[in-house]
Amino acid sequence: MGKRWNDVQWDGEPGHYEVYYLTFTDPASRIGFWIRYTMVAPLPETAEEATCSLWFCAMDPGAPNRNVGVKSSLPVAALTADSDPFELRIGDARLSDGGMAGAVEVDGSRYAWELEWQPSLPAYGHVHPLLRAVRLAKTVLFLPHPDLELTGTVWLGERRVDVAGARGGQAHLWGSKHASRWAWAHCNDFAGAPAGTFVDGVSVYVPRFGRELGPNTPVVGRIGGVDLESIGPLAVRRNSSEFDLTSWRFEAKGRGLRVEATVAPRVEDLVGVTYHDPDGDLAYCYNTEVADMSLEVFRRRPGGWRRTDELRSERRAHFEYAQRTPVEGIPLSIT
């Protein structure tokens, strides 16, 4: 696979799922967007066919009653891909290393996107190479494009959003099973921070040996021109993490950087969706692209750690919380 971290990993066998997603927040409208290209190949015992899907979610913090969560599914034969150069297609929708375009039509409303970007930073991975080599991780997460500036157009039914200067990131993940519960966050839109500044982390609990282990918390980022890579087997266990539906506090250290982060979404900004594992199990996820995030940055100096920066993002951080049972009181827009 080399450095082409967007290449499709599915080998045609059952027991696999794969996801590509783009998250960004439009600075003019303040609407956050979450667009996913997905596939799942169920295990034979589920008696279900392999499918591919397009997901479109939008969060409007000024009018949460206008939030959107829609999905369109097709037989997996509608998914095709090329490797060099990379291009993924689901029906008429496409995704490349330079942009994406597609549409979902539901109940007479059309939700569509035409977006472009220029790749900048290299890819960052959350799963240590040793764990990937022994295939211990049941899900692998990569950021082929962790820091993007997007331009283009998004249509929310009859509403048109012209996107210019929006910051976001594109990720690729694949595996055989989601964790039992987790929190995830991404932000590359901190006030006053230069382009190329981002942080992306996930904190997971996984079932092992009849009990739940965790949290394991890999975090990657780039701050002040220095990479943060806290993904080693010991680091992910030592990184402190406490999360629930409306907050996540975590700490991570690596390569002479230490960050203390707080992510704070509003309940009304969460869009509920359902993930399907290849074995038929379900996970219930609550996502928003308009959360708040603060990041205290420390650098190792002679004598210890010294606080050097505090970064803040208001309504432009991306967050997801998930568990194996639905959260009461928050509807599931996608089932």
Image (cartoon, grey):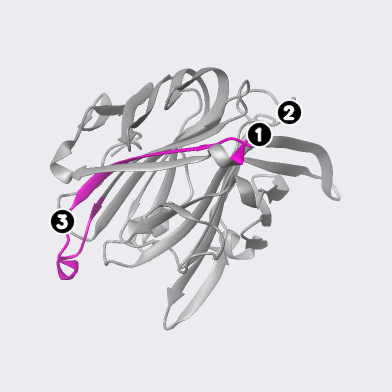
Q: Earlier in the sequence, mark 1 or mark 3?
A: 3
Mark number for residue 191? Answer: 2
Query: Residue 277's image quarter?
Result: bottom left
- Which residue is at the far bottom? 210
- At horizontal 48% and vertical 65% (from top left) the residue drawn is 326
Q: Which residues are magenta?
A: 40-64
Secondary structure under tag 1 reads: loop
- At horizontal 67% and vertical 48% (from top left) the residue drawn is 266
Q: Is 52 within the magenta?
A: yes
For the question of whether residue 163 can be seen, the reply is yes
Vertical relation: 3 (above or below) 177: above
Look at mark 1 in the image and give the residue it sits on.
62
What is the three-letter code of the residue carrying label 3? Glu
Q: Earlier in the sequence, mark 2 or mark 3?
A: 3
Eye-nearest disc, 1 or 3: 1
Q: Position of residue 115 (x, y in %)?
A: 42, 21
What is the three-letter code of the residue carrying label 2? Ala
For the question of whether residue 199 can be seen, the reply is no
- Front position in the image: 88 or 49: 49
- How crowded pointer 2 is (Cα within 10 Å; few <14, some 14-19, many 20+) is rated as few
Mark number for residue 49? Answer: 3
Vertical relation: 35 (above or below) 12: above
